Amino acid sequence: MHTLVCHLLAKDDESIEKIRRKLIEAARVYRKDKETIDWLVMQDVHNPRKFTIVERFEKESSQKYHLENPYWKTFDPYVVPSTIKKPAQLESTGPRTGPSATFQLEVSANSLSLKH
């Protein structure tokens, strides 16, 4: 099993509802991806600008189905540039990355990159 935990911070208070709605919509779509066990969205009760996404896949290579989902092209451009104040923090657990690895998630119009 492979798990990704992504921490997001809404840019401002006006962005909270916008990102919350998009994350709920994304969860409904991404849960249907092949080899996806679950795609969970959480919002911090003390700081509503903080969101956490837990993505659970059968194996690390299962992420390819997630990234190939046509919805990705609408999700990232909507969420990342317009509502996130700083780069998302992505933690990965699984057999290849070890017990825990932390990455910075950088998204541009055409690519996704992870930096240790």
Image: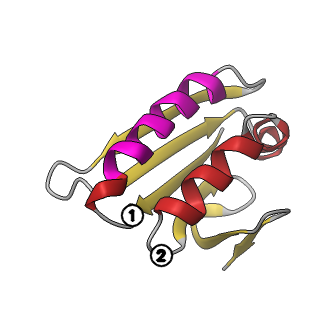
Q: What element carries label 1?
A: strand
Residue at image location 80% in from the left, 34% down from the top: 69
Residue at image location 41% in from the left, 50% down from the top: 52
Secondary structure of the magenta portion, mostly? helix
Q: Is mark 2 on a helix, strand or loop?
A: loop
The quarter of the image holding the N terminus is top right
Residue at image location 81% in from the left, 34% down from the top: 70
Residue at image location 39% in from the left, 67% down from the top: 11
Q: Is 11 left or right of 45, judged from the image as shown?
A: right
Q: Is 114 left or right of 20, judged from the image as shown?
A: right
The residue stretch that appears in magenta = 16-31
Tell me the number on the disc at residue 9. Answer: 1
In this view, the residue in front, 92 or 47, is 47
In this view, the residue in front, 63 or 86, is 86
Colour convention:
secondary structure
The quarter of the image holding the C terminus is bottom right
Residue topped by disc 2:
86
